[in-house]
Amino acid sequence: MRANKLTLDLENGCVDLSHGAGGRDMAQLISGLFHKAFGNEWLACRNDQSAFDVGAGRMVMTTDAYVVSPLFFPGGNIGSLAVHGTINDVAMAGARPQYLSASFIIEEGFRLFDLKSIADSMGEAAREAGVYIITGDTKVVERGKADGLFISTTGIGFLADGLDLSADKARAGDRVLVSGSLGDHGVAIMSKRQNLAFQTQIISDSAALHDLVAVMVGAGGGGIRVMRDPTRGGLAATLNEIAHQSGLGFRLQEKAIPVKPQVAAACELLGLDPLHIANEGKLVAIVAPDMADAVLAAMKAHRLGCDAADIGEAIADDHQFVQIATSVGGGRIADWLSGEQLPRIC
């Protein structure tokens, strides 16, 4: 029988099935790697759950799974993405994210060095955002039963009284604001795919957006109808979702939509529409016309919204189309993404 390892070999070791078996090896993995990376007073209690105080107002809860490939990409890795993505889902309600849980499905043979790097990135992303990872779980599956590592995170935040953002509150004449250039995350991932690899300086825009949301809410209050982060399916899918929920259409000005030249060039090379490319650090806001200028100014004053733009308006449209007025004077429809343009983008 193999003797229990006394310490984790974080430089050269690998995860094996004993790290998920509930014994001493698993305890060493949790305390020697995850607790060191996430360290906080809740994890220090070493319970299977964490209790926390609930502030005034309503609570917001969301959950998401992360299967991005490759695990490491320009601008981040699956760990930082799992923190930012779930924080943003909470923040799009106008809420202040506070706590996360994290669940790991690890394939036997996964390098402990890579697992530590990913956990450290999660801890750093959470600390920068002022959010705590207060509970979690690990499972180890046999070789060939997973692709290295999958992570699920659940987030809880608090929503101030009087704030109720929802797509069905959008009205004709509302302005459509985006917080910055589109498509960066998707192109950064594509540049590292084994079957698509190409040279680009684009890095993922993965970032926690709750501070940007807070300044927007401070400037626009109830004038903000709804916010979304345009992840899978990009801006086109996000606006089509809102169109169907609100019963409206949208008319956008192509020349006003911020897309970096490198992203546009990569999309042209690959035959993709930048409006279908995923983002992980951008948001779309539908804002009452009398508050749009104030919200846009607040966005531009924030480091994550300095390239924000007013790209169009909501319109009455029984067909609920997302229409684009092109730069050459024509028009087209930005439809839902058909099929899976880029699997495992997040």
Image: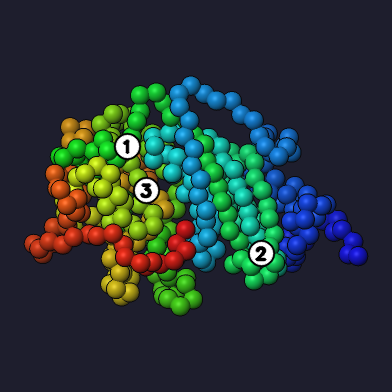
Q: Nearer the viewer, mark 1 or mark 3?
A: 1
Query: Could one spot residue 313 in this view of the protein?
Result: no
45 relative to 173 in the view: left or right: right
Q: CB of mark 2 within 8 Å of CB of mark 3?
A: no
Look at the numbered disc 2 and give the secondary structure of its residue.
strand
Query: Quarter of the image containing the N terminus?
Result: bottom right
Callout 1 amino acid: Ser
Residue hosting label 3 = 229
- Where does residue 96 sit, x and y in percent of width and height? 46, 33
Q: CA distance from mark 1 to mark 2?
A: 39 Å
Residue at the spot 18% in from the left edge and 60% down from the top edge: 333
Amino acid type indicated by mark 3: Asp
Q: Please tell me whether mark 3 sits on a helix, a strand or a loop.
A: loop
Label 2 vs label 3, nearer the camera = 2
Q: Earlier in the sequence, mark 1 or mark 3?
A: 1
Which residue appears farthest toward the left when viewing the image?
329
Q: Residues within 10 Å of mark 3 (few under 14, many from 20)?
A: many
Nearest to the observer: residue 307 or residue 333: 333
Identified by mark 2, the residue type is: Glu
- The structure residue drawn at horizontal position 15% and vertical position 39%, both measured from the top left corner, is 173
Measured in 3D between alpha carbons, the distance from the residue under mark 1 to the one under mark 3, in whole angstroms, is 13 Å
Q: Quadrant of residue 248?
A: top left
Q: Which residue is mark 1?
A: 166
Q: Check disc 2 and report the residue beneath it.
A: 107
